[in-house]
C-alpha cells in the first residue's frame, strides 16, 4: 500500500466537496478515480498534493503522514501531479521545462549557482542528458528546443507527463491525461502508462473516457458527491448498480 | 481629554475622509472595470481643482455650478485618457502602472507649465460656523462633507439603477461573461474610466477652497485613496466607504496624540495589518 | 491551438541560456567602466557615471526579485537602511567605512528576513501594495522618528568619505567612481551567474507558474525570500556607498520618487533579461541628463517616453530586436494572407 487516505474530507463554506473518504492505492498499480462531474475528484488530487488543506482526516504516503505538508515537500517525498488545464512554463523550451522539474535530481543552493564548480557543471550536464532521454522516450525528443507555449495540445500533455516523471516520483497523479486527445494518441498514452507500471511507478488518474479507464486500470474507485460509492476491478465497477445509478443522467459507463 | 474633543477630532477626520472616499471610489471603480491601478488618478483630482480655480475663483461662476463643470470636464478628460492610452492595457497591471506613471508626469509637468508652480488660493464658498449638539463645525467643511456624501449616494444609485451603471457592474464582476451577454466592453471601460476620473475631479473641486490648488496637490489624496481601498477591499465600493470611515477615524484621533506628519504612518500600518490578516480587505470579494 | 508548423517560434530572451554570451556581457560592462576615466576626468561626467553605476546595482537587484514575480516597492528602503546604518556606525562608533560597507549591507539583509517573510504571505498586487506600505513606514521612521539618530526632516549631515584603504585615499571623484565600478561589476557578475544557473531557471519558472513549480518540488517561498534578502543585501551595499558619496542623507532619498525611477528603469529596459536593467538605467539616466536643461519639459518628455514605450514595446527596450522582428513577421503574414497564400501545414 503506497498511498492511504483515512477519513479525508474537505469543506468549502457550505459545500462538502469530499466526505469521509478512505481509500488506498497499491504499489505499481494503475488506479483510476472516476465519478460524475462535481464528484470531487480534482479536490481529492488537490488534497493529496497539499494544494489545499484537509478539513478532517489524514493522508499517508509510504507509511508517513503527508497531510499538512507543503506541496513542494510532498513532491520531494515522491508524489507528482499534472493539472486538468495543462500547465507548463510556457515561455521556456521543452527541455527547460523538464530541467525545472528535475530540480530534485540536482539541487544546488545559492553557493554553487554563484560559483559554477566543476561538480555543478557536471551535474547540470547529466541532468540535461537525462532530460533529453526522458523526452526521447515520450516522443518529444525532436522538439526539445521548441518553446512550450507553441506546442500542439498532445505534445503539451506529453510534456506535462515528462515533467512529472522528471521529478523521479514514485506516485504519479494524472488529472485527465487523455482529455482532448485523438484515439491514436490515447492508445499511445495507455501504452506509456503500462510502461510506467512496468518500471515500478504507481499511477493514480482521473479520466472521463470510460473505455480508456476500464482498459488500463487495475483498480477503480468511484466517487459521487464527495463520497466513495464503489471500488474494485473495472469489471466489478461496470456491473455495480450504485455506480450505474450515479451515472444515469450524466454519462453511460462502459462503451 | 474631554469627550467633546474626541468627538470633534473624529468628526473632522470623517469629514475629510469622505472626500478622500470619493477619490478612492474613482480608483476602485477603474480597478474593478479595467483591472489596472491608475497612478495618475491624483492628477485628475488636481485637474478638478484647477477647473474650480479658474471658473469659480477667477471667472466668478457659482460654486455648485463650477463643481458640476469640474466633474464633467475631468470625466471627459478621463474618457480621452482611456481611449488613447489605457484601453489596451486591460489586466496588464505592471505595464499599466508604468504607463499611468508616465501620464502622471505628463499631466503634472503640463500643469506646472500651464498654471505655474505656485499655490493658488481659492476663496471659501461658505463662511461661518454651525453649532450642533455642542460641537463646532465650520460651515464650509459641513458643505464639503455633505456634497461628498451626495456624490457617493449618487454614484451608488447610478450603478444600481441606470443601464450603463449596471453594465459597469457586470463587467466588474466578470468581463468575459458580460461580453457574452452583449455588453460593449470598450464603451463600458471608457465610461467607467471617465466616471472614476470625474469623481476625483469632483473631490478636487470640493477641497480646492480648503487647501488651495497646486500642481502637486494630487499626491496626498491618491495615497489616502490607496490606503482606503486596500483596507476596504480593492474593487469594492462599500469597502471604500468603510475604509474611508476607518481611516478618517484613526487619523482624526491620531492627530490628538501625535504630530500631523507622523499621523500618516498610521494609515500605512493599517494597510500592513489588513494585508496580513485579510488581504482581500474588510469587504473584499473574490 | 498553435499551428503545427515545423518552424519554431523565436524564443524570448529568457529562454536562451548558455554560459558564453553573459560573461562577455559583463566583460563589456567592465571594459566600458574602465575606459571612461581615460576619456574624461570631468567631475560632472564622473558624477553621472557613478550615479549610473549605483543605480545599476539597484536595478539589477530589483530585477532579481522581479524575475520571481515580485514587484518589491520597498527595495529602496533597504538601500536606506544600509545607508543610515553605515553613516551612524562611522560617525557615532568610529568604525571604518570598509567594515561598515559589509555591516550595513548585512543589516539590510537581516531586516529583509522578517519583512520579506511577512510580505511574501501575499502575492501579486497585494504584495506590491504591502511592500509599498512598508517603504512608506520606513521612510516616515527616517523622517519623523528618532531624530537624534536619523536627523529628522532636516536629514543627516556630515557623513565622511571612505577612509584610506591600503594607503589609497578615496577623497576624489575618480577613486569613488572606481570603487563603485568594482562593486557594480562584482554584483553584475554574481547576478549574471545566478541568472544562467539552475537558480535563475527556477526563479523565472516561479514567475511563470508558481503553483506548478511548487507541485514539482520547488520551495517557492524559499526562493522568493532568498531573492528578497539577496536583493536587499545588494541594495544595502549601494546605500552604504550612497551615504559616503553624497555625505548627506534625507528620508526623501529613499521614498516613492526614487523607487519609482528604479521600477521605470528596470521595466523600460525589460524585465525578461538580466541586461534589461543595464539598458534601461544607462539610457534613461543619460536621457534624463540631456533633458535636464529643459526643466519641466524634461518630466513631460520623460512621461511621454514612458507611455509610448509601454504601449509599443511592452517587453522593454532590451527585447526591441525581437519585438521589431515579431511586428515585421506579423506584417509579412498579413500581406501573405492578403495575397491568398495560406500558412504552411
Image (cartoon, rainbow, N blue to C red):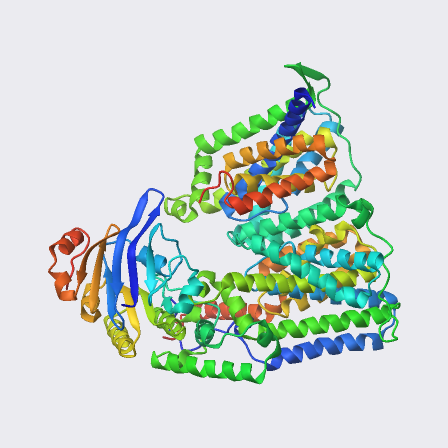
Q: Position of residue C279 (x, y in %)?
A: 67, 68
The residue depicted at 86 percent of the width and 61 percent of the height is C160
Q: Which image quadrant for residue B55?
A: top right
User: Which quadrant would the C terminus of chain C be assigned to in this image?
Assistant: bottom left
Q: Is residue A188 above or below residue C79?
A: below
Residue C176 can be seen, yes or no = yes
The residue depicted at 67 percent of the width and 72 percent of the height is C188
Residue B80 can be seen, yes or no = no
Q: Position of residue A237 (x, y in %)?
A: 15, 61
Q: Is residue C23 above or below residue C259?
A: below
Quick one: which residue is furthest to the front in this view? A63
Q: Which image quadrant for residue A161?
A: bottom left
Identify which residue, A162 or A222, lies in the foreground.
Answer: A222
User: Which quadrant would the N terminus of chain C be assigned to in this image?
Assistant: bottom left
Q: Which image quadrant for residue A6?
A: bottom left
Does C227 sit left or right of C340 as displayed? right
The residue depicted at 22 percent of the width and 64 percent of the height is A209
Q: Position of residue C13 (x, y in %)?
A: 56, 72
Q: Position of residue A65 (x, y in %)?
A: 36, 61
Q: Is residue A230 above or below residue B82?
A: below
Identify which residue, B80 or C279, lies in the foreground.
Answer: C279
Instruction: Count up the numbered dots.
Output: 0
Does A117 sit left or right of A138 as displayed? right
The residue depicted at 16 percent of the width and 66 percent of the height is A233
Amino acid at each position: 500500500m503506497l498511498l492511504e487516505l483515512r477519513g479525508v474530507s474537505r469543506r468549502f463554506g457550505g459545500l462538502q466537496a469530499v466526505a469521509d473518504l478512505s481509500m488506498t492505492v497499491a504499489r505499481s498499480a494503475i488506479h483510476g478515480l472516476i465519478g460524475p462531474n462535481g464528484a470531487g475528484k480534482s479536490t481529492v488530487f488537490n488534497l493529496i498534493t497539499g494544494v489545499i488543506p484537509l478539513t478532517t482526516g489524514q493522508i499517508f504516503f509510504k507509511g508517513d503522514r503527508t497531510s499538512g505538508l507543503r506541496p513542494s515537500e510532498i513532491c520531494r517525498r515522491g508524489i507528482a501531479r499534472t493539472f486538468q488545464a495543462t500547465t507548463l512554463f510556457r515561455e521556456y523550451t521543452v527541455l527547460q521545462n523538464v530541467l525545472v522539474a528535475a530540480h530534485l535530481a540536482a539541487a544546488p543552493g545559492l553557493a554553487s549557482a554563484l560559483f559554477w564548480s566543476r561538480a555543478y557543471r557536471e551535474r547540470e550536464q547529466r541532468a540535461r542528458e537525462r532530460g533529453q532521454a526522458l523526452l526521447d522516450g515520450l516522443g518529444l525528443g525532436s522538439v526539445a528546443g521548441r518553446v512550450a507555449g507553441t506546442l500542439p495540445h498532445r505534445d503539451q500533455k506529453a510534456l506535462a507527463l515528462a515533467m512529472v516523471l522528471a521529478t523521479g516520483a514514485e506516485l504519479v497523479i494524472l488529472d485527465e491525461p487523455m482529455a482532448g486527445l485523438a484515439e491514436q494518441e490515447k492508445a499511445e498514452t495507455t501504452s506509456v502508462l503500462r510502461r510506467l507500471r512496468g518500471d515500478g511507478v504507481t499511477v493514480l488518474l482521473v479520466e472521463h473516457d470510460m473505455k480508456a479507464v476500464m482498459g488500463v486500470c487495475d483498480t477503480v474507485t468511484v466517487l459521487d458527491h464527495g463520497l466513495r460509492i464503489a471500488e474494485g476491478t473495472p469489471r466489478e465497477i461496470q456491473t455495480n448498480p450504485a455506480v450505474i445509478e450515479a451515472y444515469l443522467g450524466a454519462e453511460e459507463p462502459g462503451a | 481629554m474631554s469627550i467633546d474633543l474626541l468627538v470633534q477630532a473624529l468628526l473632522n477626520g470623517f469629514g475629510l475622509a469622505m472626500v478622500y472616499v470619493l477619490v478612492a471610489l474613482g480608483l476602485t471603480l477603474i480597478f474593478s472595470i479595467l483591472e489596472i491601478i491608475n497612478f495618475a488618478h491624483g492628477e485628475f483630482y488636481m485637474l478638478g481643482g484647477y477647473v474650480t480655480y479658474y471658473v469659480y475663483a477667477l471667472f466668478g461662476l457659482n460654486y455648485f455650478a463650477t463643481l458640476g463643470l469640474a466633474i464633467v470636464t475631468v470625466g471627459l478628460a478621463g474618457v480621452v485618457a482611456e481611449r488613447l492610452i489605457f484601453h489596451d492595457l486591460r489586466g496588464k497591471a505592471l505595464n499599466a502602472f508604468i504607463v499611468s506613471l508616465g501620464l502622471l508626469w505628463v499631466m503634472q509637468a503640463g500643469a506646472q507649465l500651464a498654471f505655474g508652480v505656485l499655490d493658488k488660493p481659492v476663496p471659501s464658498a461658505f463662511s461661518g460656523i454651525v453649532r450642533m449638539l455642542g460641537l463646532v463645525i465650520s460651515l464650509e467643511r459641513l458643505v464639503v462633507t455633505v456634497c461628498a456624501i451626495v456624490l457617493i449616494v449618487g454614484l451608488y444609485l447610478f450603478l444600481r439603477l441606470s443601464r450603463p451603471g449596471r453594465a459597469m457592474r457586470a463587467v466588474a464582476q466578470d468581463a468575459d461573461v458580460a461580453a457574452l451577454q452583449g455588453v460593449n466592453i470598450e464603451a463600458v471601460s471608457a465610461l467607467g474610466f471617465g466616471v472614476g476620473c470625474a469623481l476625483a475631479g469632483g473631490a478636487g473641486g470640493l477641497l480646492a477652497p480648503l487647501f488651495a490648488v497646486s500642481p502637486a496637490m494630487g499626491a496626498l489624496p491618491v495615497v489616502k485613496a490607496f490606503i482606503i481601498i486596500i483596507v476596504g477591499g480593492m474593487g469594492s465600493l462599500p469597502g471604500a466607504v468603510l475604509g474611508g470611515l476607518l481611516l478618517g477615524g484613526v487619523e482624526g484621533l491620531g492627530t490628538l496624540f501625535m504630530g500631523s506628519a507622523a499621523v500618516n504612518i498610521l494609515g500605512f500600518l493599517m494597510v500592513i495589518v489588513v494585508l496580513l490578516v485579510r488581504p482581500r480587505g474588510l469587504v473584499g470579494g473574490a | 491551438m498553435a499551428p503545427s508548423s515545423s518552424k519554431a517560434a523565436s524564443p524570448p530572451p529568457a529562454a536562451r541560456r548558455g554560459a558564453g554570451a553573459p560573461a562577455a556581457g559583463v566583460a563589456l560592462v567592465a571594459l566600458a567602466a574602465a575606459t571612461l576615466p581615460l576619456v574624461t576626468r570631468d567631475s560632472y561626467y564622473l558624477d553621472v557615471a557613478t550615479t549610473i553605476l549605483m543605480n545599476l546595482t539597484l536595478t539589477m537587484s530589483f530585477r532579481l526579485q522581479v524575475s520571481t514575480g515580485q514587484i518589491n516597492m520597498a527595495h529602496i528602503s533597504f538601500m536606506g537602511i544600509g545607508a543610515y546604518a553605515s553613516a551612524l556606525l562611522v560617525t557615532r562608533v568610529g568604525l571604518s567605512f570598509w567594515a561598515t560597507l559589509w555591516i550595513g549591507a548585512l543589516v539590510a539583509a537581516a531586516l529583509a528576513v522578517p519583512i520579506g517573510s511577512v510580505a511574501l504571505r501575499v502575492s501579486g498586487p497585494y504584495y506590491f501594495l504591502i511592500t509599498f506600505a512598508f517603504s512608506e513606514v520606513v521612510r516616515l521612521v527616517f523622517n519623523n522618528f528618532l531624530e537624534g539618530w536619523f536627523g529628522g526632516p532636516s536629514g543627516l549631515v556630515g557623513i565622511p568619505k571612505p577612509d584610506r584603504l591600503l594607503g589609497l585615499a578615496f577623497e576624489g571623484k575618480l577613486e569613488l567612481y572606481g570603487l563603485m565600478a568594482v562593486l557594480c561589476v562584482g554584483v553584475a557578475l554574481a547576478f549574471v551567474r545566478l541568472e544562467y544557473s539552475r537558480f535563475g531557471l527556477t526563479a523565472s519558472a516561479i514567475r511563470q507558474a508558481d503553483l506548478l513549480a511548487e507541485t514539482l518540488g520547488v520551495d517557492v517561498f524559499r526562493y522568493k525570500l532568498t531573492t528578497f534578502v539577496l536583493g536587499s543585501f545588494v541594495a544595502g551595499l549601494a546605500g552604504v556607498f550612497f551615504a559616503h558619496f553624497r555625505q548627506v542623507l534625507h528620508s526623501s532619498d529613499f521614498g516613492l520618487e526614487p523607487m519609482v525611477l528604479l521600477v521605470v528603469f528596470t521595466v523600460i529596459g525589460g524585465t525578461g533579461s538580466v541586461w534589461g536593467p543595464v539598458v534601461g538605467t544607462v539610457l534613461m539616466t543619460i536621457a534624463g541628463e540631456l533633458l535636464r536643461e529643459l526643466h519641466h519639459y524634461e518630466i513631460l518628455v520623460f512621461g511621454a517616453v514612458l507611455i509610448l514605450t509601454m504601449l509599443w514595446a511592452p517587453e522593454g527596450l532590451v527585447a526591441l530586436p525581437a519585438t521589431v522582428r515579431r511586428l515585421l513577421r506579423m506584417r509579412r503574414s498579413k500581406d501573405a494572407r492578403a495575397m491568398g497564400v495560406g500558412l504552411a501545414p
